[in-house]
Image (cartoon, rainbow, N blue to C red):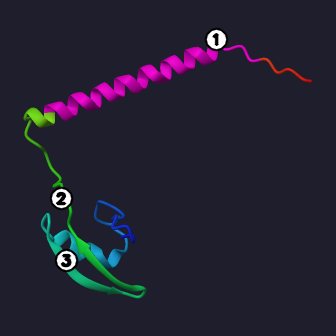
Amino acid sequence: VSKTGDGLGNLRGQIQPREVEEALFKLREGEIGPVIPIGTGVHLIRCVKREYAGQKPLDVEVQKAIRKKLEMERWDRERRRIVRELRARAIIRLEQE
């Protein structure tokens, strides 16, 4: 956790500092955790947002997220293709004075 309040890590084993992980995973969204003493001081934690692992129902929101992800992948592929094509057609000249 940084001074700006941003957490480091999202999954078990990735949370930094490790001493806050156990308490953090016990919290529900919006809850404030206990004061956790660490060698360099103390940490105050709060669960801002919680996303549970597992399969989601195929509702309208999930369909929108899937559609957006596929559109972004298609856009990225097209962008890379255009850049490759432009590089292949580019003529580079170095002029010396």
Q: Quadrant of residue 49?
A: bottom left
Callouts 3 and 2 close, C-beta under 8 Å: no
User: Is residue 84 in the magenta section?
Assistant: yes
Q: Residue at x 82, y 21 (%)?
A: 94
Q: Position of residue 90 (x, y in %)?
A: 66, 14
Identify the residue under disc 3: 33
The kind of residue on which mark 3 rests is: Gly
> Given the image, on which type of amino acid does mark 1 rest?
Arg
Q: Give the numbered dot on residue 57.
A: none
Left or right: 92, with 69 as reference point: right
Give the labeled residue for mark 2: 50
Residue drawn at the location 74% of the way across and 18% of the way down: 92
- Give the labeled residue for mark 1: 89
Label 3 to label 2, Cα distance in Å?
Answer: 14 Å
Quadrant for residue 77, please give it. top left
Residue 88: image quadrant is top right
- Place of residue 82 in the rendered image (x, y in percent of width and height, measured from the top left): 50, 17
Q: Say which label, 1 or 2, has the lower sequence index.
A: 2
Would you call the spot at circle 2 few (<14 residues within 10 Å), some (14-19), or many (20 or more)?
few
Quadrant of the frame with the C terminus? top right
* Magenta stretch: includes residue 75: yes
What is the quadrant of the N terminus in the image? bottom left
Q: Are marks 1 and 2 in contact (CB under 8 Å)?
A: no
Q: CA distance from mark 1 to mark 2?
A: 49 Å
Residue 71 position, x and y percent, is 30, 25
* Residues drawn in magenta: 63-92
